[in-house]
Each structure stands twice: as C-alpha cells, then as structure tokens.
Image: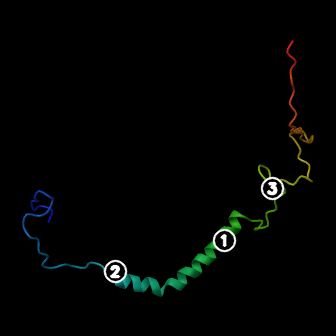
Amino acid sequence: MERIQTGKHNRPVTDIKIISTTVFKDPFEEAAEKKANEHILKKEEEENAKIGKWYSNPQGDQSETFKEGVGKYLDPSKKQLGKRGAPLDFGTITNETKTKKIP
C-alpha cells in the first residue's frame, strides 16, 4: 500500500484490494479477561489507596486551620522559638502612613 503511486489529491492511482488479514492477538479475549479480573483490581486499588494515605498523611485528615493565608496551620497559642530559644517577634503590620513636611 505504501509503494503505490498517488495522484493529484494524494489518492492511489490504482484500486487497492485487501485479500486477507491475520489477527495476532484477539482484542475481545483480552477485554473479557480484564472484565473478569476487574473486582480483583478494584480491591487492590482500595488497599493501595489506604497505604498511600497513611504514608503521605500519618496524622489523618484532621487538619485544623487557625486563619487564612500563609501560616494557616500554625497554632497561634503555641509560641514559636528562634534558633537561640527566644520567642520570635515579627512585629505588627499597620496601615499608618507618615507624611513629610515640605519647607
């Protein structure tokens, strides 16, 4: 089929006839086998999902948020300590603006 000349519109100049075919692997047999083993695969997926949850999140799904945005999982009642054991002080953010007097 690849060696036959084509015409103006990329169509074969002569007619192509398929006389015989050979099926190397029956796709319907594979589908029937897959469907028969579907319940076994489903059970394995459930077991794998349980294992994956435990390793990726050993504390479970009980994540508590204390505020919105960055640091939402940090408990404000627990004091954060720096490298030398002193509490961290990040200061406060205010909306105050300073004005300069122009002479």
Label 3 element class: loop
Closest to the camera, between mark 2 and mark 1, is: 2
Give coordinates of residue 11: x percent, y percent.
14, 62
Residue kind at label 2, given as amino acid type:
Pro
At x 79% / y 54%, what residue is drawn?
68
Q: Where is residue 72, by image quadrant? A: bottom right
Q: Where is residue 3, by image quadrant? A: bottom left
Q: Is residue 15 left or right of residue 98?
A: left
- In the foreground, 51 or 3: 3
Label 1 element class: helix
Q: Which residue was labeled with disc 2?
A: 27
The chosen color scheme is rainbow
Closest to the camera, between mark 3 and mark 1, is: 3
Q: Where is residue 23, by image quadrant? A: bottom left
Q: Which residue was labeled with disc 1?
A: 51
Label 2 element class: helix
Could you tell me which quadrant the N terminus lies in? bottom left
Q: Which residue was labeled with disc 3?
A: 73
Q: Residue furthest left?
A: 14
Could you tell me which quadrant the C terminus lies in? top right
What's the distance in space between the residues labelled 2 and 3, CA to CA? 51 Å
What's the distance in space between the residues labelled 3 and 1, CA to CA? 24 Å
Closest to the camera, between mark 2 and mark 3, is: 3
What's the distance in space between the residues labelled 2 and 1, CA to CA? 33 Å
Earlier-in-chain disc, 3 versus 1 = 1
Give coordinates of residue 15: x percent, y percent.
8, 70
Earlier-in-chain disc, 2 versus 1 = 2
